[in-house]
């Protein structure tokens, strides 16, 4: 037994290390295998950093000792059957607790495909934004698109954005106007200067079903990637200040993140940031908020 003063002193001294002992859900990884007979649509063959198999066993090895309890895969292929390919991987390796698939809400087959993949409890939503020639701002007006998003919401699934810019964030705000029951996850927000979209960010921050990934934090400046938290703190502060401790998520963006720094560097920077927050805030960022955003089992 220890007295209260001693306990508080010990707790304060341990705060900086608190994040290190937390269980972690990485809400943004990509899985692919260029060695498949059909190949992959991404990454391109000439990308020497990324063009190699990114599979659960490799992810397990490089994150050993970081308390990674699970990961949510975010689909990086527009091929319909790659949704099933990832679900099959998840069935063989339980570190994949969920996947955010790739379906088009305006497609006439959307409802049938959503029902098919959603039979698997690891299918937790879809990703839509400005990848693969898509434009959420324009596509909102396609026949059936909003009805597809309503079906997504009624199914208890979420919508991830991709990738942040002012036009996309304005479109995300429009989505939440038209489908207020839909949970939305904004990916990689620190990669964008928040000043370029502050009115929309303030509007989105006022909507409790909108979550944000403090992911893709690192940036290349004059050919160099700073590895000091101080360089990135202002942007993280602004995102955290807007959305608060209940609606921010950890995501590594692995293996895409390898183009900036090794996984452990990516992890260290956000770990150092949240070590200065309360243990409760760190636990929410690294683990509990992922449950609220994705409802994974």
Image (cartoon, grey):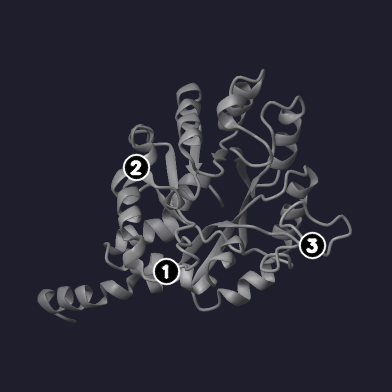
Local SS, label 3: loop
Between marks 1 and 3 in the image, the one whose residue lies nearer the viewer? 1
* Relative depth, front residue between 95 and 108: 108
CA distance for labels 1 and 2 = 21 Å
Residue 195: mark in rendering: 2
The answer for how far apart the CA atoms under marks 1 and 3 are is: 30 Å
Q: Residue furthest front?
A: 222
Dot in front, 2 or 3: 2
Q: Earlier in the sequence, mark 1 or mark 3?
A: 3
Q: Which residue is mark 3?
A: 34
Residue at point 50%, 66% (across, down): 223
* Residue drawn 72% across the image and 42% down it: 117
Q: Are marks 1 and 3 in contact (CB under 8 Å)?
A: no
Q: Quadrant for the N terminus, please.
A: bottom left
Q: Position of residue 174 (x, y in %)?
A: 47, 25
User: Residue 61, image x and y in percent?
Assistant: 62, 77
Residue 125 in which image quadrant: top right
Quick check: can you spot residue 189? yes
Total labels drawn: 3
Question: With respect to residue 283, does 13 lie above or below?
Answer: below
Relative to 112, is 153 on the left or the right? left
Of residue 27 and residue 23, the one placed in the foreground of this image is 27
Percent coordinates x, y for residue 224 in the rendering: 47, 68
| Vertical arrangement, residue 232 with respect to residue 104, above or below | below
Q: Determine which of the numbered discs, if any, sits on residue 226 in the image.
A: 1
Instruction: Judge from the rendering whether residue 66 lies leftward or rightward of residue 280; answer left or right.
Output: right
Q: Secondary structure at mark 1?
A: loop
């Amino acid at each position: 037994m220890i007295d209260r003063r001693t306990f508080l002193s010990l707790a304060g001294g341990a705060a900086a290390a608190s994040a290190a002992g937390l269980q972690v859900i990485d809400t943004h990884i990509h899985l692919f295998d260029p060695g498949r007979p059909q190949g992959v649509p991404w990454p391109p063959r000439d990308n020497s950093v990324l063009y190699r198999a990114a599979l659960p066993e490799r992810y397990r090895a490089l994150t050993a000792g970081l308390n990674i309890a699970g990961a949510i895969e975010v689909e990086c292929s527009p091929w319909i059957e790659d949704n099933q390919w990832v679900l099959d991987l998840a069935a063989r390796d339980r570190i994949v607790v969920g996947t955010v698939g790739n379906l088009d809400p305006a497609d006439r087959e959307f409802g049938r495909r959503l029902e098919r993949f959603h039979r698997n409890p690891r299918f937790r939503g879809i990703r839509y934004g400005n990848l693969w020639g898509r434009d959420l701002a324009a596509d909102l007006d396609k026949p059936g698109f909003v009805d597809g998003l309503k079906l997504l919401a009624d199914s208890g699934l979420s919508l991830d954005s991709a990738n942040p810019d002012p036009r996309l964030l304005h479109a995300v705000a429009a989505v939440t106007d038209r489908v207020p029951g839909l949970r939305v996850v904004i990916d990689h927000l620190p990669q964008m200067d928040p000043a370029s979209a502050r009115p929309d960010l303030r509007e989105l921050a006022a909507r409790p079903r909108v979550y944000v990934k403090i992911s893709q934090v690192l940036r290349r400046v004059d050919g160099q990637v700073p590895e000091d938290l101080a360089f990135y703190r202002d942007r993280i502060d602004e995102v955290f200040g807007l959305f608060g401790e209940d609606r921010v998520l950890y995501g590594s963006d692995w293996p895409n993140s390898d183009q900036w720094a090794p996984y452990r560097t990516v992890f260290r920077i956000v770990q150092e940031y949240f070590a200065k927050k309360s243990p409760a805030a760190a636990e929410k960022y690294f683990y509990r908020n992922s449950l609220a955003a994705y409802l994974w089992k």
